[in-house]
Image: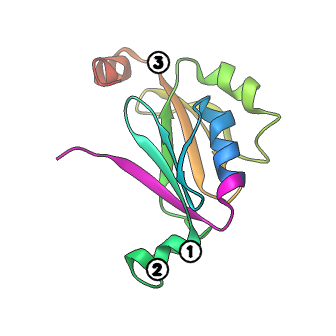
Amino acid sequence: MNFASVRIITDDVNRLVEFYEKITGVSAGRPAPVFAELVMPSCTLAIGHSQTVQLFGAGSAVAANNRTVIIEFHVHDVDAEYERLKPLVDEWVKEPTTMPWGNRALLFRDPDGNLVNLFTPVTEEAIQRFSGRL
């Protein structure tokens, strides 16, 4: 089994696609007006309109209602990303901080309120944990 993607359900696909394209530097593929994919080497971030929820079962997902999942991106330099993203992000949750598990991380919310974490392993143990994975 391979982990394929994370899908965000939104009421405004264009707004969220534009935001994540700016954050990641990856252009989204748009196989349908109600669906987009940002394909990265390690995983795909899919964005679907709330209209697509009916295909999975009415009420199975609710747009802009997530408070349990954190979308995470491994980056080369989290402090440089913080400076780059300051004009793009409206809600910062945590400025760059070194976490107890050895990652330097920052947290913000996307336009729908989903929590996004950018991190860089900085301790030897954290660097070792990620070597060969990304």
Q: Position of residue 111 (x, y in %)?
A: 71, 55
Q: Determine if the magenta segment contains residue 4.
A: yes
- Kindly identify which residue carries mark 1: 51
Q: Amino acid at mark 2?
A: Gln
Q: Which residues are magenta?
A: 1-14
Which image quadrant is residue 96 in? top right
Q: Amino acid at mark 1?
A: Gln
- Counting from the top left corner in percent of width and height, residue 43 is at 38, 38
Q: Are marks 3 and 2 in contact (CB under 8 Å)?
A: no
Camera-nearest residue between 49 and 8: 49
Q: Quadrant of residue 125?
A: top left
Residue lying at the far bottom in this picture: please name it. Answer: 58
Marked residue nearer the N-terminal end (3 or 2): 2
Q: Quadrant of the C terminus?
A: top left
Identify residue for label 3.
122
The alpha-carbon separation of the residues under discs 3 and 2 comes to 43 Å
Instruction: Write the residue at 38% across / 48% down.
Output: 5
Q: Residue at x 76, y 42 (%)?
A: 89
Disc 1 or 3, which lies upstream in sequence? 1
Judged left or right of residue 128, residue 113 is right
Q: Residues within 10 Å of mark 2 (few under 14, many from 20)?
A: few
- Secondary structure of residue under mark 3: loop
Q: Nearer the viewer, residue 27 or 9?
A: 27
